[in-house]
């Protein structure tokens, strides 16, 4: 993975050399990112809004034939992105408060009693070989997760750390619902704090995404998942290369 990480570091250095980008360019890139991130992350979880329908929903217009929940999921996810961007500016270490706050935004007006609250029941992940820990172990597992982040996380390459935050968080599956969206927001929080562009996991790669996560969870083999995340991190640079006219 070292060669892959070195390539991503070179891309980051190239982008950094062009910063700060003009405000109008950043505004255009940000609007595109928020839309694609929201659409794909929700679509992975079964939301049926198309990309264009998601754009309309974010503009406050109701799409015929779609549920209220699907509209709220889009709006909530956008708000969660904005909150993550605020956290990036503060550049504080990851905390359980941050995690619960992000999750609370994801489930706002959808499942308020469980929003930002660790699960009290056991769960299974449909189609996965991995079984998350018993509900009674969630608090302890999340404490250990944060301790790992503080003690071991800083020694990892930023992309490696972000991917492991995602994988290890979703392995615990601390909430009744919304774990996938929250995990992808946490991953991007880590990437953005390190100066990398946030990534969009395309819904078209959902099967590979689930399979590599399950491999990490059941076999302690993170390599396939790391390679997937590294690939989407590389894709995350492409909008910048396009507007800057950079050939990589």
Image: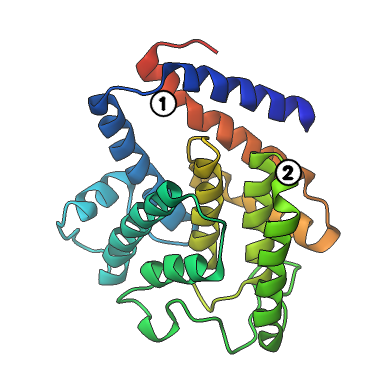
| Residue under numbered circle 2 | 156
At 76% from the left and 61% from the top, the residue drawn is 217
Res. 220 in view: yes
Q: Is residue 56 left or right of residue 145?
A: left
Q: Secondary structure at mark 1?
A: helix
At 33% from the left and 53% from the top, the residue drawn is 82
Q: Is residue 156 above or below residue 185?
A: above
At 76% from the left and 25% from the top, the residue drawn is 3
Q: Are marks 2 and 1 in contact (CB under 8 Å)?
A: no
Q: Image quadrant for the C terminus?
A: top right
At 49% from the left and 42% from the top, the residue drawn is 192
Residue 225 image point, x, y percent? 71, 46
Residue 181 image point, x, y percent? 48, 60
Q: Is residue 179 above or below residue 202?
A: below
| Residue under numbered circle 1 | 239
Q: Is residue 161 above or below residue 97?
A: above
Q: Which label belongs to residue 95? A: none
């Amino acid at each position: 993975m070292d060669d892959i990480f070195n390539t991503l570091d070179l891309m980051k250095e190239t982008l950094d050399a062009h910063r700060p980008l003009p405000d109008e360019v950043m505004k255009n890139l940000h609007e595109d990112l928020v839309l694609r991130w929201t659409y794909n992350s929700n679509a992975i979880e079964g939301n049926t809004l198309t990309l264009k329908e998601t754009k309309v929903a974010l503009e406050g217009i109701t799409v015929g034939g779609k549920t209220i929940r699907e509209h709220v999921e889009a709006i909530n996810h956008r708000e969660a992105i904005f909150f993550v961007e605020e956290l990036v500016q503060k550049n504080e270490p990851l905390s359980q408060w941050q995690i619960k706050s992000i999750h609370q935004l994801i489930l706002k007006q959808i499942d308020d009693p469980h929003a930002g609250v660790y699960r009290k029941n056991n769960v299974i992940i449909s189609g996965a070989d991995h079984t998350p820990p018993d509900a009674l172990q969630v608090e302890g597992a999340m404490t250990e997760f944060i301790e790992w982040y503080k003690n071991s996380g800083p020694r990892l390459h930023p992309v490696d750390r972000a991917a492991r935050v995602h994988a290890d968080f979703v392995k615990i599956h601390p909430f009744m619902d919304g774990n996938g969206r929250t995990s992808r927001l946490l991953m991007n929080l880590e990437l953005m704090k390190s100066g990398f562009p946030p990534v969009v996991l395309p819904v078209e790669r959902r099967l590979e995404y689930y399979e590599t996560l399950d491999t990490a969870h059941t076999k302690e083999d993170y390599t396939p998942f790391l390679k997937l995340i590294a690939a989407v991190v590389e894709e995350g640079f492409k909008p910048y290369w396009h507007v800057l006219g950079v050939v990589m």
